[in-house]
Image: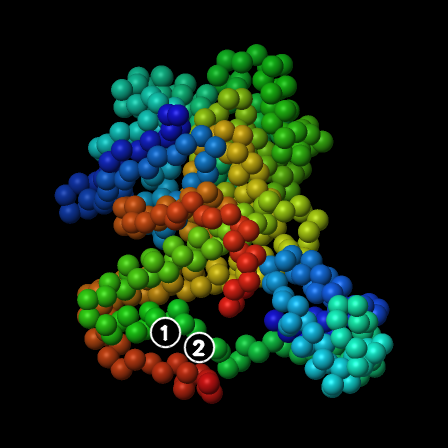
Amino acid sequence: MTPSLVLRQVSKVYGSGPTEVHALREVDLSVDGGELVAVMGPSGSGKSTLLTIAGSLEEPTSGEVLVGGSELSSMSRNDRARLRRRLIGYVFQDFNLLAGLTAVENAALPLELDGVGGRAARATGLAALEALGLADRAARYPDELSGGERQRVAIARAVVGDRHLLLADEPTGALDSVNGEAVMGLLRAACKRGVAGVVVTHDAQLASWADRVVFLRDGRVVDQTARPPGPESLLTPGPNP
Amino acid sequence: MSVRHALLALLSEGPKYGLQLRQEFESRTGEVWPLNVGQVYTTLQRLERDGLVESDDPEGEGPQKGFRITASGGGELARWLRTPPETVPPPRDELVIKVLVALRVPGVDVHELIQVHRRHLVQLMQQYTHLKAEHPAHDVGLALVVDAELFRLEGAVRWLDAADARLARLPAAGSAAAAAATAVPPRPGRRLGVRR
């Protein structure tokens, strides 16, 4: 299977000369469809840069980025924009919903921007909302929804249609822990349906939802967790269970 | 964890058999804290000796022996529920000790050591989170026990993050310089009044 996201020796340098900042240094990362990967690191470790480069919102200084098998730098600007609309979904800490659109209109927006007819786009948007338990909120505007509901609409928008890659930047930052947990459960479920997910965070509880946690420090991948053994291993009596 | 008080709590609902007490204890803690049969019976014997529970047959033994809580058992349970857990003085934390010791050991990269422990803790958190994710939402006992473990482990990860950042800010980060900067290692135990 081709991984949905591949970063090969990706580096990013901002500025030049004495003000030069190395945000990423030779980062290798590969994420398969169905896998949720968390990227953990302190502020300034390069997490957000990694996410914007993976999502083709920014270009690397060197190295390759492949989404769904296509190398981004070999594509025209238009093709990259189309790939972003069709294959990549984004979830941000502050939801980024359009205030003048209802929940279902927000969810269907990427499809409409991609030229899908209004009625078909709305039907697919509604299906995405339904999968997240929000069918009864479809006609509400963002300011009529709670924080947890807004983030679920943002997730619906990120997975609507046939997405390959879901990118999230501190997606539960604005939510309390129980709502945050619900959001992470939904992101995990979306990935289980075949989407590759990358969540960047400094929060270990959030990262612990992932199948794999990659640790970033000073722009480098310094370590990662092994795929954890099944949770049943916690249930065997030990000296300090 | 007080097995003694957990058993009193189960008996406060009504008389129960030994085997039943073990099963109920495990199901209510989401089976995260398994008990062996011996632990249950030894604890019940002590509770009976202390007059906190009574049995149908003080001479009898075995899983079918029934127990009920006494009035003083009820009083003990009420008192325990309201007693703050032992948090002061702070327990000696092995992780803290390892990082403090590492500062003094030549050739040890403290940041690398911190990352080893961070990875281990996050892996453990992944296991707990996946356990919670795979259990039905109505299993509140399991969710509460797992949350408690997750917050405890998260606390340790956050301490490691803070230690990492603090050490990185030292004039010349690295074990030797760091050790020099903490030439006289603090004795947190004494200063904070640890008696152990």
Question: On the image, which quarter does residue B120 sit in?
Answer: bottom left
In the image, is residue A220 above or below residue B161?
above
Chain ID for label 1? B
In the image, is residue A170 above or below residue A114?
below
Query: Alpha-carbon neighbours of circle 1 within 10 Å: few (<14), some, or many (≥20)?
Result: few
Residue of label 2: B92
In the image, is residue B117 above or below residue B191?
above
Query: Alpha-carbon neighbours of circle 2 within 10 Å: few (<14), some, or many (≥20)?
Result: few
Q: Residue furthest left?
A: A17
Question: On the image, which quarter does residue B101 sit in?
Answer: bottom left
Residue at the location (57% across, 27% down)?
A: A107
Q: Quadrant of the C terminus of chain A?
A: bottom right
Q: Quadrant of the N terminus of chain A?
A: top left
Which circle marks residue B97 in the picture?
A: 1
Circle 1 — which element?
A: helix
Q: Position of residue B67 (x, y in %)?
A: 80, 74
Chain ID for label 2? B
Sequence-wise first label, 2 or 1: 2
Q: CA distance from mark 2 to mark 1?
A: 8 Å
Residue at the location (36% across, 74% down)?
A: B97
Circle 2 — which element?
A: loop
Residue at the location (82% across, 74% down)?
A: B68
Amino acid identity at mark 2:
Arg
Q: Say whether marks 2 and 1 touch (CB < 8 Å).
A: yes
Residue at the location (58% across, 17% down)?
A: A121
Q: Nearer the viewer, residue B91 or B65?
A: B65
Q: Position of residue A93 (x, y in %)?
A: 49, 42
